Amino acid sequence: MGHIGAPVPWILLQYLISVEVLTGFGCIFHAYGLYLFMDYIYYIRKLPVLSYLQEYDEILVKRIQQLRNIRHRPDQFTVLVREIPLCVEHKSHSCCVDQFFSKHHPCTYQSYKMLYDGKDLEYLLNQATSIARKIEKLREKSLIKKHNRESSLLDAFQEDAAIVSLHEDKLQNICQKIRYIQCENRLKQKELPVSFVAFKSRWGAALAAQSQQHSNPLLWITEMAPEPRDVIWKNLVIPCRYMPLYKIGVFLTASLLTIFFAIPVTAVQGIAKFEKLRKWFPPAMAVQLIPGLRSIVTGYLPSVILHGFIYIVPFAMLAMAELAGCISRSKGEIKACNMVFYFLVGNVFFLSLVSGSLLDEIGEYFTHPGNFPSHLASAVTAQADFFMTYILTDGLSGFSLEILQPGLLFWDFIKSQTFSRGKKKSPYLYSLPYFRVIPFVSLSILIGMVYAVVAPLLLPFLIGYFFLGYVVYINQIQNVYEIVYETCGQYWPYIHHYIIVGIILMQITMIGLFGLKSKPAASISTIPLLLLTIIFNEYCKIRFLPTFCHYPIQNAVENDELDEKNGLLAVNCENAINAYCPPCLQPVNFMAQESSSTQPLVSST
Amino acid sequence: MGHIGAPVPWILLQYLISVEVLTGFGCIFHAYGLYLFMDYIYYIRKLPVLSYLQEYDEILVKRIQQLRNIRHRPDQFTVLVREIPLCVEHKSHSCCVDQFFSKHHPCTYQSYKMLYDGKDLEYLLNQATSIARKIEKLREKSLIKKHNRESSLLDAFQEDAAIVSLHEDKLQNICQKIRYIQCENRLKQKELPVSFVAFKSRWGAALAAQSQQHSNPLLWITEMAPEPRDVIWKNLVIPCRYMPLYKIGVFLTASLLTIFFAIPVTAVQGIAKFEKLRKWFPPAMAVQLIPGLRSIVTGYLPSVILHGFIYIVPFAMLAMAELAGCISRSKGEIKACNMVFYFLVGNVFFLSLVSGSLLDEIGEYFTHPGNFPSHLASAVTAQADFFMTYILTDGLSGFSLEILQPGLLFWDFIKSQTFSRGKKKSPYLYSLPYFRVIPFVSLSILIGMVYAVVAPLLLPFLIGYFFLGYVVYINQIQNVYEIVYETCGQYWPYIHHYIIVGIILMQITMIGLFGLKSKPAASISTIPLLLLTIIFNEYCKIRFLPTFCHYPIQNAVENDELDEKNGLLAVNCENAINAYCPPCLQPVNFMAQESSSTQPLVSST
């Protein structure tokens, strides 16, 4: 995302200004009547829709430019192949790969890299790392002792040296074992039916990724490889045929979490009342000593609990998305982003509108689907003030939290105090948590959409919110977060989808609202508008979505030609296959004196 | 279809025996109780599902074999390209095609054939044909006169000759015009943005058809070309971007026809009562003269009217499918087949179950979706006898009608007596009307599925029906109908879908039935079964459907290799591009004396 991630808040802002202000204020001036509708349709259909299509197109152009800019990247030459059948003769998958691709893609196939089940290796590597750390500690200790010239403790010193050499022997032993396992013959037994196949050109890779290789489409499944730094290696172990089960499981869990989320929260809120707390946790009495603190605690505790729960949800969703077997971090975060958005729509937007649990609402909706618009409209009009406060408080507090990063500070503090105590601080920088940021911003858009007509006074606040958001996120992206993967704008189709969900909800609210105001003609004439929105969404899907999923042949050839001109095609292609090396197969190098033997005995192809 | 078309009734029969008899009779023996359910699940899930998967797999294998058997066919080498952009420099599409494909598919691209708007040419060709027919008639007349030696009428004879020569001049004139238009320069002005592109190998064609060519997926749309004899040339004129509108239009029309079909039928039935007929159409009185005929007319007239309407529907649907812009007859017939099936499910199955119109039912379903299963179950149990009669009478009368072909005879009679009077009888043989046959057979399967548990006595009749159907259709396919296109089994996924619809309806009926019998546990435990059926369907879609849509690379390479062994690859490839010649561009040849100039002046590439 990175370079393309930046303009997203800006586009949202621009889009919001164009759609919401125009339609919102347009609607106030021509209040209630069919003229409003013509006007409304005109604004919605003509100006913003055209500018919106242009927006989508611009992002597409940026994606293609970005693909050209990062054309040296190995994933453009590489295809991930899964469900490789076993060669009966040699009892291995690897000879199958070579045979298959040199036969079916003879002009472009270059080489392949098998993947191996690295559980044992990872275990040994962890062991080796911990021993190496121990040795280092002991050395440091003895150095300190030496420095203090406690020569009287020569025995202790010798004892230390003996322990160190013992550990060193152990480490060398383990390193030998690792190198032994890393050699090709041993690895072959742990072969997975997964391989990265490199091609001589982007053209070949794009063609292979987009075509069906075998008459059984569940064999030789090809797709464009993710970036090497983006791959989740451990998820590649999961056989493709179990993936649907994983996905269904995660979908069910996420749905249950969304539907039943209110129940544990209200339960905890019920328990955590100050009166009860005082009984169960006597130190809480101390709060009473500071005057005024008690009323703050009593007032804000339920809200703090709710927000605490909501803060945790994105991380839970991310963990679930990774459990679902996503092969790359980017795909996992996109999945999490999706789940979090629907969670927020259910548990922030709808639950604020209705009294009672989401389950009751869904049941009500299924038994009387016809009542939904009027129900929604009356609830929406009643809660306008609440959402204005929501945008003001939660939106603004969200930005300050984003800048101060209290969550990460707190987490780092806990980590350094507990299980990582004494370990080296990892220099790892976090990436922008799209799965947390995008759903919240999208929810604000949705609220803005729905209230654009009902309570247009919300819009100035929302515009303020977006301006601030733009400034905050530009700063965060440029100065705080590290880019750990680049999807070239693959988040955009999802954001587009959220905007469409917002527009559809607005139009349903309008239908209900005109029904409530006893204007059946107006109500009925909004229905075609709803259908037009859905058709518009379908058009966008047909027109733009494929290019976000595939690498078009034309662009592949263009980039190949650019490389050929600079004479870089062979170099890039060579780099491609070497870039995909799972962490457990990287050469071990724990001690300086071992430098001569850090290479695996035989390197795997 | 052809070779593969034959086994379909047999497979249906086999499947019906395995699923229905086993589950149906299994259910009678262990009536009512959860044990039945375990048993039922066992039978449904284990035996028939496995055999059913095997069935699907067998059809897939047959499709691949058939693709190998007919590997000489030109469509395996050819890709249909639509929405070719205009070359600004040369103001034509054709130079774009050559440039694009020789750049983006350099190893495999061979040549291309542009399509042209042939309306003018067709008009001229029709004129030419009618004049040629006139000349022939005049010649015959004068020959007869000569034969009768009416030498006294020398003047008349000369007059005839003068008219003939006048017509011949006219014909020659038109032929000149046609050849002038057929020459390349004139055609270029009527270029369509559509082209058939031939590749040097099946491999190249398969890759090009399956990949996205341009970053705008609505340009350079590629798909495997249909067979030359299967192409509907006039539909290729429709720009791709209007196709969704056509499709939506046809979908709406078909839905309206399905929903409101009952209204005109009941109206006609109301008008066509014998008492009213007597008043309006006095000759009907003659019926009264023959004793007993009156009661037959009064009794059967409404049913005859209904069946007449239902008999016309498939043809109306076919016409609509062709209007929807299908590029090949096979696709049009598949579309029509689909629409007819849903029409029959609505207007034969559901309308027989309920009193009142389908519209009321759909409204009822939307307002109270929860009541649907119990509603269906009570209606189904009440109408068991009706459907037994339906299978016996309509099924058997359907076969006799199929063998006797009264519709075609009647149509031919009308044609020869009215607008084609005196024209040569066309030797055209009809193809098996899949769009009429498959929906009726599928409806019988659906009825059998639903009644397998409710009224298993229906099953023996149904088995009789399928045995008879097998014999009848094997005979019809082998001896009566001509194969006018070959889809290699592309009808099968649709038949599979109809069977799944039947199973789902059966399971919903079961849920309702157990609800009616006050067995909530049994009712609830059927719901997972329903979900499993849906998951099974999804699995079949993932596992088998892609191979019915694409040409897998592996098979393409295999067939290429077979051809290379026989040295036929170049020949087949050469044939491929010449096979696609629209009827209006074929050389004109109306008279023997014109043989020297029948070739177009310049042949288009």
Image (tube, coloured by chain):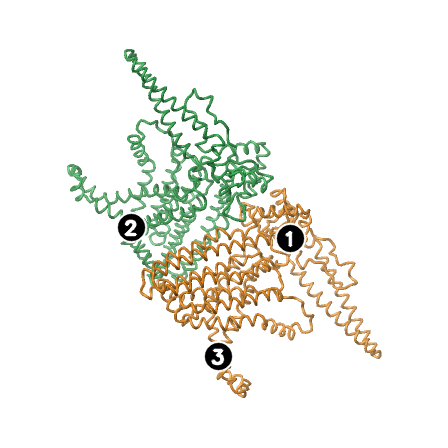
Chain colours: A orange, B green
Nearest to N terminus: mark 1 or mark 3? 1
Coordinates of residue B66 in the picture (x, y in percent): 50, 38
Say which residue label 1 marks: A74
A389 with respect to A589 (left or right):
left
Chain hosting mark 2: B
Question: Visible in this render: residue B457?
Answer: no
Q: Nearer the viewer, residue B314 or B381?
A: B314
* SS class, disc 3: helix
Separation of residues labelled 1 and 2 (CA atoms): 68 Å
Q: Amino acid at mark 2?
A: Asp
Coordinates of residue B318 in the picture (x, y in percent): 37, 42
Q: Amino acid at mark 1?
A: Pro
Whether pointer 3 and pointer 2 mark residues with C-beta atoms closer than 8 Å, the reply is no
Label 3 Cα neighbours within 10 Å, binned few <14 / some 14-19 / many ≥20: few
Chain hosting mark 3: A
Say which residue label 3 marks: A271
Q: Residue furthest bottom?
A: A289
Separation of residues labelled 3 and 2 (CA atoms): 63 Å
Q: Kindly identify which numbered label has been placed on residue B274.
A: none
